[in-house]
Amino acid sequence: MKINSNITVREVKDDDELKEFVMFPHKLYKDSKYWVAPIIKEELEVLNKEINPVFKNADAHYFLALINGEIVGRIAALINWVEVKDLKKKKVRFGWFDFVDNKEVSKSLLNEVIKIGNDNNLEFIEGPVGFSNMDKAGMLIKGFEKKNTMITLYNHSYYQDHMIAHGYKKLAEWVEYELKIANYEDSPEKVKKFSDLILKRYKLKKLNFTKTEQIVPYVDQMFYLLGKTYDKLQTFVPIQEYQIDYYKNKFLKYINPGFIKCVTDENDELVAFAITMPSFSNALKKINGKVDFFGKLRLLHAKNFNHKGSLYLIGVRPDFQNKGVIAILFNELQKFYNKFGITEVETNPELIENTAIQQLWKNYENNQHKNRATFTKEI
């Protein structure tokens, strides 16, 4: 326990305190039109060292800041030992970072993470991030008047000012887009023609799904392609084999199979895939993190009746990167979106240097509506 003037910082030690840690944003954002609560049960499981397999190669400490006994902030100090030992990045991560507009509060919380880093001979601090690339990351720095998606963070506009005031510099930056989905006849001819050309040139095949069970045989290949797609990016940490089943169980229940498109080569090996989902933001906003009977109905309705989609992940095999296969995926998605009634798609965060995918969005009516960033500092 640490005291800074009238601020007390306390490490979470039991399940009751972990529940307080998870529930603090519900108080901080109770008047926000745009903050979308995560599902409380899932948040508790992610942070539970007995449930989340990431703790086979990661450590975490959770801290709460209090003033006069009232919680005013929280932060998680995270160490991914695969990143530290295998990738030789001496980084302590911070995540689950939320706080009132008081710079002493945010500084006190960040100092706890720095102390964990120093105790483990690490050299710099970075966040907000999760344990790996599969977790939410990036502090919102533009787009505060938009709801967050199921897999992105939301925060108040003052957060960035606190980071700068404490001497942190921006490291990675992501952009997000809103795309209008026209009728297929009116969709970009360039994408249609390029899709047909690439299919014929490389003897590729399109995979469309109608049942979740049809997707399952390809999931391991998808995770393999994810690693090969993003392993050169600055934020990449390999996902371990024992984490894959955990992520399968976590996300497959939200998948509508028509929202996933795959491309295989002539030997039926996976070349590329796109995972999109119906947008759950409005449903999650209404249920406020609680999945009771009515909450399940709202999520089920969002899964099957929606005008808005959310792009989650794209993976491309290295030997097919920069060969245009993403156009095939989006051409097939365009057809499905029209049938389903999707008129708008929100992309999830793409690193700002990922210009290839951003070039594709220029073929659609688009709005670059959000930016987010991680911040870093030597310790």
Image (cartoon, rainbow, N blue to C red):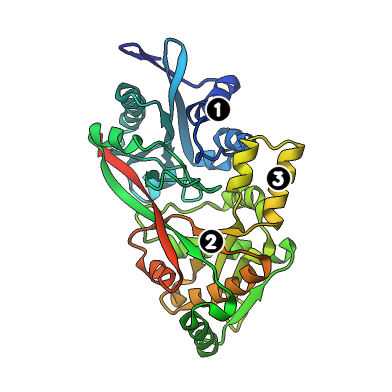
1 or 3: tag closer to the N-terminus: 1
In the rendered image, residue 359, in percent from the top left (x then y), is placed at 38, 71
Callout 1, which amino acid?
Met
Q: Amino acid under label 2?
A: Val
What is the quadrant of the N terminus in the image? top left
Disc 3 marks which residue?
Answer: 298
Q: Residue at x 50, y 45 (%)?
A: 147
Q: Whole-Å distance between the Cαs marked 1 and 2?
A: 30 Å
* SS of the residue under disc 2: strand
Reply above or below: 245 against 35.
below
- Which quadrant would residue 322 be assigned to in this image? bottom left
Residue drawn at the location 28% of the way across and 35% of the way down: 161
Q: Is residue 97 left or right of residue 249?
A: left
Looking at the image, is 296 positioned above or below residue 360?
above
**Residues packed near mark 3 inside 10 Å, few (<14), some (14 to 19) or many (20 plus):** some
Q: Nearer the viewer, residue 250 or 20?
A: 20
SS type, badge 3: helix
Residue beneath disc 1: 23
Quadrant housing residue 213: bottom right
Find residue 16 and report its horizontal and vertical position in percent.
59, 20
Amino acid of disc 3: Arg
In the displayed structure image, the side of residue 97 where residue 21 appears, left or right: right
Instruction: Measure the C-alpha gap from mark 1 to mark 3.
Output: 21 Å
Q: Which mark is residue 345?
A: 2
Spatial separation of the CA atoms under disc 3 and disc 2 = 20 Å
Q: Pick the residue in front: 59 or 203.
A: 203
